[in-house]
Image (spheres, helix red, strand yellow):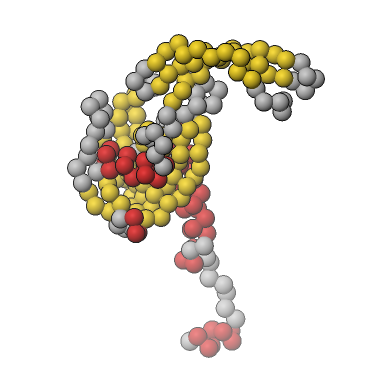
Amino acid sequence: MTIPAVVESSETVYRGAVFRIDDMTIALTDRRGERHTIRRQVMRHAPCVVLLVHDLATDRYLLEREYRAGSDLFAYGLPAGLMDGDEDPMAAAMRELAEETGVVPDERELRVDRVGAFYSSEGMADELAHIMVLHLGAWRQEERHFDGDEYVESSWVSWQELLVTRVTSSNGMIAIQHEALRRLRDASYDTRNIPERPRSAEEGAILE
């Protein structure tokens, strides 16, 4: 199917504090040119940022725990939050990180791996998650500023501790898997991990 979908009708059937739901009738055209009508309910949701935060000095990562109504779990996850209006993803990342954890990076010593932007559940929602890994060369701790109904615990953990923690958010796991690949790649270029090449007798004599 290459012909754009046509929205024939759309009605907002629910509007809440964070999202709304639109009941839509959509026309699709198949390869034979035949038109088909489908009905979908779509959750309209603000975009968000998801952050894997890495303290370079200690090689630790920031892990959070809070109650998630969707899974009915006190779930482990990564710092994340909604973007405000036309807010830039990087600005939203810095704001959410400071609000939730009190961590304020020194942007002069900050390296950002932009993992990508992914839909959380494209079959039923338009929420776009901007996922990134923040490598902090230096940072300071400030007071946290939660929303009125927000209760979040946070702690720095080692890479091994992070790997054995059950993170149930798909966006969080995308960030963690991206970082796992980076660590694997960097380890392969670490000369300490390269086996020493056997030396010839001549080389041994010169070095000794």
160 vs 64, nearest the viewer:
64
Q: Quadrant of residue 38?
A: top right
Task: Indicate the position of residue 126 as horizontal and vertical percent values.
Answer: 50, 27
89 vs 131, nearest the viewer:
89
Query: Number of numbered discs present?
Result: 0
Q: In this view, does 158 lie to the left or right of 8?
A: left
* Relative height, residue 25 to residue 55 (above, below): above
Task: Indicate the position of residue 83 as horizontal and vertical percent values.
Answer: 38, 35
Residue at image position (50%, 39%) is: 117
Residue located farthest toward the right when viewing the structure as drawn: 32
Q: Quadrant of residue 171?
A: top left
134 vs 18, nearest the viewer:
18
Task: Indicate the position of residue 183 as horizontal and vertical percent values.
Answer: 47, 53
Residue at image position (46%, 35%) is: 129
150 vs 153, nearest the viewer:
150
Quadrant location of the N terminus in the rendered image: top right
Task: Indicate the position of residue 56 as horizontal and vertical percent values.
Answer: 35, 56
Residue at image position (41%, 37%) is: 86
* Relative height, residue 200 to residue 100 (above, below): below
Is residue 52 in sight in this rendering? no
Is residue 67 in sight in this rendering? yes
* Relative height, residue 71 to residue 158 (above, below): above
Q: Is residue 147 left or right of residue 17?
A: left
Residue at image position (42%, 47%) is: 133
Residue located farthest toward the bottom when viewing the structure as drawn: 206
